[in-house]
Each structure stands twice: as C-alpha cells, then as structure tokens.
Amino acid sequence: MPQWVLAPEGARRVDARLERAGLLDLAMEEAGRAVADHLLAARPDGPVLLLAGSGANGGDAFVAARHLRVRGVDAAVLALPSRHPLTRANRQRWRAVGGTVTALGAASLARGLRTATMVVDGLLGTGFTPPLRPATAELIATVNAWRGPGRRVLAIDVPSGLDAASALVPEGALRADDTVTLMGYKAALLFGAAAVHAGRVTLAPLSAPPEWVQEDALAARPTDAEVGALLPVRHADAHKGTAGRVWIVGGHPGTTGAPALAGVGALRAGAGLVTVHSTADVPLVTAELMVRRATSWDAWRVETEGASRPDAVALGMGLGPDAAALARTVLAWNIPTVVDADALQPELAGHGHARVIWTPHPGEAARLLGTDTAGIVRDPLGAAHTLQQRFGGVVVLKGGPSVVAHAGGLSVARGGHPGMATAGMGDTLSGILAALLGQGLSAPDAAVAGVRLHARAGERAGARHGYGLIASDVALELGGAWQDVSGGAAGEAW
Ligand SMILES: NC(=O)C1=CN([C@@H]2O[C@H](COP(=O)(O)OP(=O)(O)OC[C@H]3O[C@@H](n4cnc5c(N)ncnc54)[C@H](O)[C@@H]3O)[C@@H](O)[C@H]2O)[C@H](O)CC1
C-alpha cells in the first residue's frame, strides 16, 4: 500500500473529508487502537499514564486508554478540558468501561509519574502552532525530566510541541522514544533534529480512501516493493553492451578518488562498461574500471566530439574549476546525465532536461539557490521542490533521508545509516544513478531507486562496520541491496 507524507494542512483536509463522510469517529477509533496495539506489542511492565489534550489528539488518547484497559493494562488518564465532540465522546466511552479521568495539572502529573513506566502523549498533534503556551510547556518539561531508562514516552501522531511541518525543534517540545503517526508521515518525523525527538516512528495508515490521502500529500514515501518494481530486470541474452555504457567525468589533482568511487558505484549498480574520463591520474581502484586521461578538458571536448555517446554520464565529482563549463557541454548532448559536486553551479539554472539528475547535498543546494544551508535543512521538501522548479529535470537533495523532486512530485527515501556521513558517499551515489540511467530507467525512476539502493547498501555496510564504514564498503553491498529491494528478483526474467 502506498505511503505518504502529509503537511498539517493536508491532514486537516483529509480529516474534513472524513468528517463530511461521517467517518472521523471511526478514524479516531482506529488511531487509538493502533496506539494501544503498538504499546501492547512492547509489553508494558507497569502502569501506563495517558495525557489527553483538548483536541482530537486527546481523543486518540482516550480511545487508546480504553483498548489498553479492556486488555488488562493498568491505564490512567490525565486530561485537559475539551470541547471537541469526538474527544468528549471518547472520554465518555472510557468512563463507560470503568476508566476514571483526573484533571491534568502540575500536581496530578507529578503524582501520576511516580508509578508510571510509560507515558502516552496525546496533548498536542497536528493542531499545534508554536510557541507553546507556558502551562503546556511546564507539563511537557516535567515529562521530559521524568523520561529515562525504564520510563518511556510514546507520542500519538507527533510529539507534543513539535511543529509537524518542520525539521527544527521548537523550544520545549516533548522528547519521545516512539511515535505512532496517523494516516501519513509528517515532515518533522523524518528530517533533522525533529526526527530525533520523535524516536522510532511507526505509521498507522488508517482506512481512509488512499486517493484522499494522495491528493493532499506533500510527498510519497515508497516502500521497497514499490522501489523494487522500478529496477531493471535483465534478460538471459544480456551482455555488457546492453547493460549500459557509463562515463564518469571528473577528477582534478588532489581529488582523483571521487571519480574512482563513482566508477565503482556504477559498476556495482550493474553498469556494463564504465569509463572514467579525467585530466588527472585517476587510480585504477579495480581492474574492471577503464580510465582515460585527457591532456586538458578542451582536448577532451575535441576527442569526444565525434565519438559515440555513452548511455549515461555522471559528471562533477572532484572536477574542480572547469566543472560548470564542462557541464554545459555535456548537458547539450541531451543524454541521461547526473550532475554532481563541483558541476552544481547556479549558472546552470534552467539547463536540466528531462533526463538530468542534479544531486546536491544541503551545502550545494544552498549555493544553487543563493541561500543558507540552515534554510535547506529546515525544509528539505520545500528546498527540493524549489530546486527542481529552477533547474529542471530531477533533483536528489541528499541527506538522511534524501528527497527526490521531479515534475510529478516529491518522494522521500527510506533507510540509510549514520555511518554514511563520510567522504565519497555522494560520489558512490552518482555512479549508482548513472548506472540506472544507463540501464534504461527514466530519471525519476533512477533517482527513486538509486537513493534507496544506496541507503539499503549503507544499512548493510553499517551492520558490518558501524561508524567505521567507508564509501567503498557501501559499493560492495550494492549487489545485496539490489537483492533485498527487488525481493531477490534480479536475473529472473526467463
Ligand atoms: N486524519 C488523521 O490523521 C486523524 C488524526 N486525528 C488526530 O487529530 C489530531 C489533530 O487534532 P486537532 O484537534 O486538530 O488538534 P490537536 O489535538 O493537535 O491540538 C488542538 C489543541 O491544541 C491547542 N493548542 C494549539 N496550539 C497550542 C499552543 N501553542 N500551546 C498550547 N496549546 C495549543 C489548541 O488550543 C487545541 O485545543 C492529530 O494530530 C491526530 O492525533 C484524529 O483523531 C483521527 C484522524
């Protein structure tokens, strides 16, 4: 089933449709039940304290409390007064099964926390607008101070005090160990410091018609089954000429490893023939890589003028000062092209044709947009969208997680490993993307599949090497990552 990222306004629009259809009560029931199921799966070993705010997030908490109680869990609710009809209805249903409600305040919270081993946060969800009011901020500060070993916090939809749309953490926000988010992911749960505040995130999709959610979604979050379906399947008569001829164009004295890593990435992502073109001495890191040295980029232009074009090019890795001019030359060939690193220059705005993938990290994205890196990190979805509009083609805004922007919308990658924060990781990705373009994928499909293969390979390398992983380890795991994502379908095209 497709999964989506929703902005708070999008979630509200879906809520409004559910309400018009008379389905909102059922959605809240499902939401609270999903929270209770999640909590029960973690086998709570003591009393659970649920905090219910005045909005629908509080209603979800009442539903969760009821499901916990009827399944034998010691659950108590502290609640703020509410005028929300569904929250009030679920407060009554909680009472109907024998639950009691205590008014939520500093004293009752302190009492409840003395014996609790788990807090369920239903104070504020997508209806919150920063900054926190002082009384709520005080309650959240108490829970944050309580949290620790054996004292866990599970947030409903969004940890209270996080702005669901932003990667930044507003002052005083709740820190959760787990978040069960509803209907769709929220940007805050995926990016930056806000994602760290949310802990482990689980999606409870709820049974709204998928097209309602899709229509209001900011971005897709493809599953491995969806990504696997994009990957090329090779036929038995495949040979190196049909598996994609890829050129890697880059390298400069002092940065010759970058194109070499891209070359290995391309080979390990299935390219049939990979040639590194450079004006510097690129190390032959593996015998399968071909390396051609030109005396200058002008000479290279003349040499390649009449030559048959490759199926895909990746350029810019370690390329140095000539990169923008060279990018213009290659973009004019109008063939599948990955533009990376030094070639990511603002003057190329508008030069992206349909088969171009631009791959900036946040610093390069800031350079391209003439803004600061903090702005990119705060709103990666917005930044990727703006980059795509200005530069054309497809944009991969690299990060944990990477965002793909194309004319049809946005997509957020899954997975990865913190150990991937190391030199050469982006070069490897460029090689992967070029390999997929060379095997015939469209630029949007190559970008979506490439970032997931890269992230999955990083997870595998991370499991082996932890923070000591290097880019070459990730390249070595690409074959396994491909098998994982495709469900082992590679080579089964008989
Ligand atoms: N479609 C779905 O995904 C469903 C989601 N559900 C839940 O509904 C909430 C959103 O509910 P809403 O009533 O709109 O808002 P909240 O409960 O998040 O909060 C409203 C509450 O918060 C107070 N408030 C606002 N700003 C502040 C502030 N700065 N400081 C303190 N308090 C503030 C405001 O006064 C309101 O009283 C969503 O997150 C899900 O949990 C549905 O249950 C099912 C469908």
Image (cartoon, grey):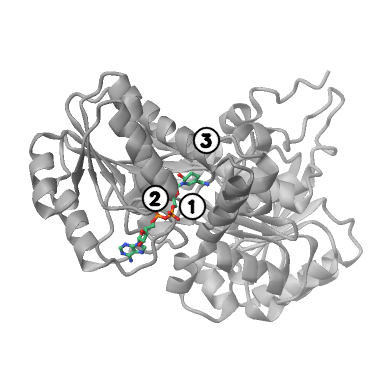
Q: CA distance from mark 1 to mark 3?
A: 21 Å
Dot 1 and dot 2 residues touching (CB under 8 Å): yes
* Among the two numbered marks 1 and 2 on one chain, the one whose residue lies closer to the N terminus: 2
Q: Amino acid at mark 2?
A: Val
- Where is residue 332? Give x, y as percent: 84, 70
Q: CA distance from mark 1 to mark 2?
A: 8 Å
Residue that numbered label 2 is attached to: 158
Q: Secondary structure at mark 1?
A: loop
Q: Amino acid at mark 1?
A: Lys
Q: Amino acid at mark 3?
A: Leu
Tell me the quadrant of ligand 1. bottom left
Residue that numbered label 1 is attached to: 186
Q: Residue at x 26, y 67 (%)?
A: 133
Q: Quadrant of the C terminus?
A: top right
- Where is residue 189? Give x, y as percent: 43, 51
Q: Residue at x 63, y 76 (%)?
A: 345
Q: Is residue 38 left or right of residue 443?
A: left
Count numbered badges in the picture. 3
Nearest-to-viewer mark from 3 and 2: 3
Between residue 287 and residue 169, name the one nearer to us.
Answer: 169
Between residue 185 and residue 284, name the one nearer to us.
Answer: 185
Q: Is residue 340 above or below residue 444?
A: below
Res. 26 mark: 3
Q: Is residue 436 above or below residue 13?
A: above
Specify whether residue 283 is in view: no
